Image (cartoon, grey):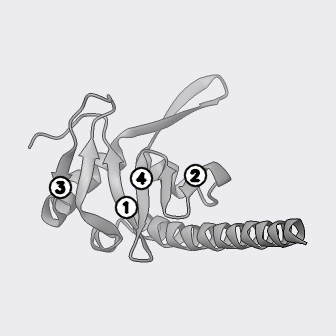
Amino acid sequence: MAPRVFICFFLVTLLSACATSAIAAEDLQQFWNQFRQAVEKNDKTRVAEMTQFPLETRGPVDSDRVIPVGRDRFVKEVYDKAMDQFEDSIVVNGKVIDKNLRETILEKTTLAPNDQQSADFAFILSMQFERIGGIWKLSRIYLEEPLEE
């Protein structure tokens, strides 16, 4: 009898985890849609509302220091710097076309399963997002060139 109880408990736990994961993925996709709309409109204030401050910024190298950024500096300096930086390349008719972060965000309409690392953490393009108090927020952004303090 005990093995059956264990198996039932295991299955209930597994199904619960799968349901929670599906809800978290749907929640993240809804957040991403709103984030994309704010970027599309170049609405820095709205993007700032969707950001955890101080926002962590870092260069592309593991040894680059994390530089915390407040809301004002984000809106005045970091947002444009991040959105204009190189993010991806594609080849069209034998020509390499570079795309910046803004263009890449706008093209990414659907999140992939590997974008979300856990129910509360996602790594999308060069950005990290965390669910903080039940709300998704941009929490770190990687920059081509690290900021000065």
Real-space Cα separation, disc 3 to disc 1, in angstroms: 12 Å
Q: Which residue is the site of mark 3?
A: 69
* Measured Cα–Cα span from mark 3 to mark 4: 15 Å
Mark 2 lies on residue: 115
Check disc 3 and give the amino acid type.
Answer: Val
Residue at horizontal 35 percent and vertical 65 percent from the top: 42
* Residue 116: percent from left, percent from top: 57, 55
Instruction: Please rate how many residues cluster around mark 3, counting C-alpha atoms within 10 Å: few if below 14, some from 14 to 19, many from 20.
Output: many
Q: Kindly indicate the quadrant of the structure image that contains residue 94.
A: top right
Tell me the residue at 72%/70% (across/down): 13
Side of 124 relative to 48 (left or right): right
Q: Earlier in the sequence, mark 2 or mark 1?
A: 2
Q: Quick one: label 2, few (<14), some, or many (20+) residues within 10 Å?
A: some
Instruction: Give percent across and percent down for residue 8.
Output: 84, 72
Q: Amino acid at mark 2?
A: Asp
What residue appears at the point 14 percent right and 58 percent down from the top-left corner? 73
Instruction: Find out whether the residues at labels 1 and 4 contact each other: C-beta distance under 8 Å.
Output: yes
Please count the marks in the image: 4
Which mark is drawn over residue 128?
4
Q: Amino acid at mark 4?
A: Gln
Labels 4 and 2 touching (C-beta < 8 A): no
**Residue sitting nearer the eye, 81 or 132:** 132
Tell me which numbered mark, 3 or 1, is placed earlier along the sequence.
Answer: 3
Establish if 122 lies above or below 137.
above
Quadrant of the drawing holding the C terminus: top left
